[in-house]
Image: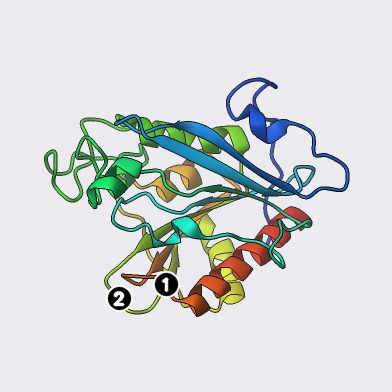
Amino acid sequence: MAFSRKSTGREPKGGFLAFTRTPRRPGNLLARRGLAGRSVGGRPIGLLQRGDPSIEGELLVFGCIHGDECTASGLQPLSNGCPDPASEIFLVPNLNPDGFAATTRLNGRGVDLNRNFPSGWRAIGRRGDPQYSGPQPFSEPETRLAARIVRTLKPRVTIWFHQHSQPQPLVRAWGQSAPSAHAFARLAHLPFRRLPWPDGTAPNWQNHRFPGTSSFVVELPPGHLETDLKDRLERGLVRLARKVGED
């Protein structure tokens, strides 16, 4: 499994996500929390940083993009209860707090955020429909924020968590994202399938926009996240982040 090195640095000090670039204090593992942006309804969208910022290969995790599929928003990829010293992991627990508050898949303007990205975007449905893609790509502040986070952090691997109707979890990927997705599936002891991306999805956009990186989906079962699965996911995230940081 190989991951490309980042070709450019992050935004200048003092800009977007500046809190992620302040020096680590000697002897302390890094655990930071900051505000990345706000939803269309004004709710905060936070970003967590865990690990060692000197490691160049980052893993980025979005715990929730559909407001009624947020069981992964509480994942904490830690080692023995602490940030892992051999990796750097960024987490956006909930990209869609308005949808979560309303218990709906859609954002505050009735848009499916995971159909609002520009790769393969097409007009789907009308406002409030389950897969309404919005009036145009990146019409929603949440999708623009997600893209800005990816552009700023330049992660080698990004994982998007969803929930589906099936009783078993599934790691799904396509194209350049398949090798790292398959690796995560092995590390977390999950089934893996190659499935093409629907139009306008976040992984489709990142995989096209940033060749050499990988963005894929983990589908979790409906309902509460069982302890055994939660443990496997958290261990798998740490193990994958270590591999990303080593290459």
| Picture coordinates of residue 224, whole percent (x, y) | 37, 70
Whether residue 120 is visible to the viewer of this picture, yes or no, is no
- Disc 2 target residue: 166
Decide: few, some or many residues near mark 2? Use Cα within 10 Å; few <14, some 14-19, many ≥20: few
Residue drawn at the location 39% of the way across and 62% of the way down: 71
Residue drawn at the location 22% of the way across and 35% of the way down: 134
Alpha-carbon span between mark 2 and mark 1: 9 Å
Residue drawn at the location 60% of the way across and 30% of the way down: 17
Quadrant in the picture for the N terminus: bottom right
Seen from the viewer's position, the closer of residues 60 and 14 is: 14
| Picture coordinates of residue 126, whole percent (x, y) | 11, 40
168 left or right of 46 in image? left
Whether residue 73 is visible to the viewer of this picture, yes or no, is yes
As drawn, 167 above or below 245: below
Q: Residue 223 — which label?
A: none
Query: Pointer 2 and pointer 1: residues touching (CB < 8 Å)?
Result: yes
| Picture coordinates of residue 49, whole percent (x, y) | 64, 45
Residue drawn at the location 42% of the way across and 47% of the way down: 94
Decide: few, some or many residues near mark 1? Use Cα within 10 Å; few <14, some 14-19, many ≥20: many
Residue 167: image quadrant is: bottom left
| Picture coordinates of residue 181, whole percent (x, y) | 54, 64
Label 2 element class: loop
The three-letter amino acid code for the residue at tag 2 is Gln
235 left or right of 190 in image? right
Seen from the viewer's position, the closer of residues 13 and 9 is: 13
Colour treatment of the image: rainbow
Q: Residue 170 — which label?
A: 1
